[in-house]
Image (cartoon, rainbow, N blue to C red):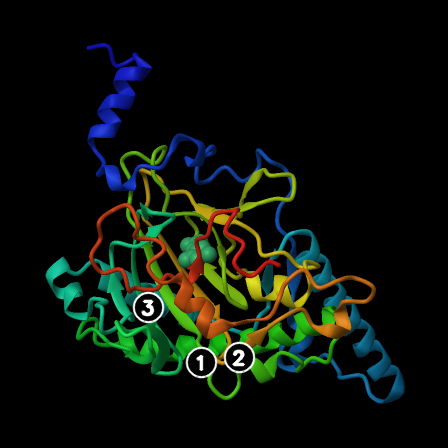
Amino acid sequence: MGVEDPVLVQQLANLQIDPNFVLPPEHRPTRKYNDYTAAGEQVPVIDLSSLRRSNKNPGEEEEEGEEGSRRSSLIHEKLVEQVGKACEEWGFFQVINHGISLSLLDEVETNALNFFALPLEEKSKVRRTFENALGYYDSELTKNVRDWKELFDFTTRGVLELPVASSGNEEQIHVYSNQWPEYPSTFREVCEKWSKSVESLAFELLGLIAESLGLPATYFHKYWLPDDSNFIRLNYYPKCPTPNLALGVSRHKDGGGLTVLVQDEVGGLEVRRKDGEWIGIKPQRDAFVINVGDLFQVWSNDKYKSVEHRVVVNENKARFSVPFFFNPSQSTDVAPVPQLLGENLPLYRQYNWGDFLQTRKGSNFKNLGVENVQIYHFAINRDENDVKVQV
Ligand SMILES: O=C(O)CCC(=O)C(=O)O
Ligand SMILES: [Fe+2]
């Protein structure tokens, strides 16, 4: 048989995949999931050890007095500068020495993989529905194409309140609650522990980013307290027989504040560099991937851009990742921070984060005849020309 024939090979490959997963040719992956070097430069890696006294080597003395505090403020300035440079040049960076135990990460991974390995019937007991947008889901769409993945969403807050439009055009609040599977029995406890750790790291990063913009460290905290709209997603990307046609997540930008993402050693996350090149982020077990979402693009008046990224899948290994979407309270009004404008005109007019989420609703489901159009996709999936917030 003419297996050398590329057209035939392509046709055979096409047969193995549900057409809902197939991307238009211009958006298909261009590089293999583990090709990190072809494009050269990598996303910066930033060491956070100076944020934690407890990370000092045993026996290392804390320097006392003026000299000591001068040194630590210089170290801090350097850290803030690195964060600012990474946000400006990449919109993405990795952090090491973040203070989160890797054994906790192992536990999260084991529990999540055991959950995803359960029969669909069992997983479907905690399936996301119209009434509850949290839980298990296997039909996520990004830009109207189905993602090659399964996921499980929960929030550190226990509940997530989201506005939904009712038939009478009045806004209603839907309260979504975490739903936990019966198996694995340790799943909930481990996920809850994880969410607390990652949340405190996210607040530290929020502070560093504020400082890198020349603002007080707690400047943005008011938008998150007392009730933010964060959520955590466990992503499972199964092996894919046709990784040249589909993506784990199509190109998109994250619409919220910050994303803190942990990935396993498989690889596949790609970031779009300023020159338009897709760069694979090389997984490093102890490095978490951080990116700024659309809100920082608006607050900083385009100094920090929310950068496109996507996930390449492969035929050899399933992949696992855990993003924490650190999003503010529904009531947050977002606009360029006046102190950051200088001579520049604001590029965005004010919008409300809760209202914005509502406008996202259903936008992914246009062409597929999917009935449940009310489910949110929090990561922003807009096309380049969708300039809802831009003046
Ligand atoms: O799995 C990943 O590495 C990225 C996932 C992602 O970008 C998202 O869910 O918004
Ligand atoms: Fe994302």
Q: Which residue is mark 2?
A: 200
Mark 2 and 3 residues: CB-CB less than 8 Å, in contact? no
- Please give left or right for residue 97 compared with residue 337 in the image: left
Q: Earlier in the sequence, mark 2 or mark 3?
A: 3
The 10 Å Cα crowd at callout 2, few under 14, some 14 to 19, many 20 or more, is few
Q: Does the beta carbon at disc 3 come under 8 Å from ligand 1?
A: no
Q: Which residue is mark 3?
A: 153
Q: Does the beta carbon at disc 2 come under 8 Å from ligand 1?
A: no
Q: Give, as a three-letter code, the residue at label 3.
A: Asp
Q: Give, as a three-letter code, the residue at label 2.
A: Ser
- Please give left or right for residue 278 compared with residue 340 in the image: left
Is 387 drawn above or below residue 175 in the view shown?
Answer: above
Give how far across and how far down residue 296 sits, in percent.
Answer: 61, 65
Residue 187 location, quadrant: bottom left
Give how far across and how far down residue 96 sits, in percent.
Answer: 59, 64
Mark pair 1, 3: CA separation = 15 Å
Looking at the image, can residue 214 be seen?
no
Q: Give, as a three-letter code, the residue at label 1.
A: Lys
Mark pair 2, 3: CA separation = 19 Å
Which residue is outermost to the front?
A: 168
Q: Secondary structure at mark 3?
A: strand
Mark 2 and 1 residues: CB-CB less than 8 Å, in contact? yes
Give how far across and how far down residue 167 sits, in percent.
Answer: 25, 71
Q: Quadrant of the N terminus?
A: top left
Q: Secondary structure at mark 2?
A: helix
Mark 1 and 3 residues: CB-CB less than 8 Å, in contact? no
- Please give left or right for residue 148 compared with residue 277 in the image: left
Which mark is on residue 196? 1
Of labels 2 and 3, the one closer to you: 3
Residue beneath the point at 33% across and 77% down:
170
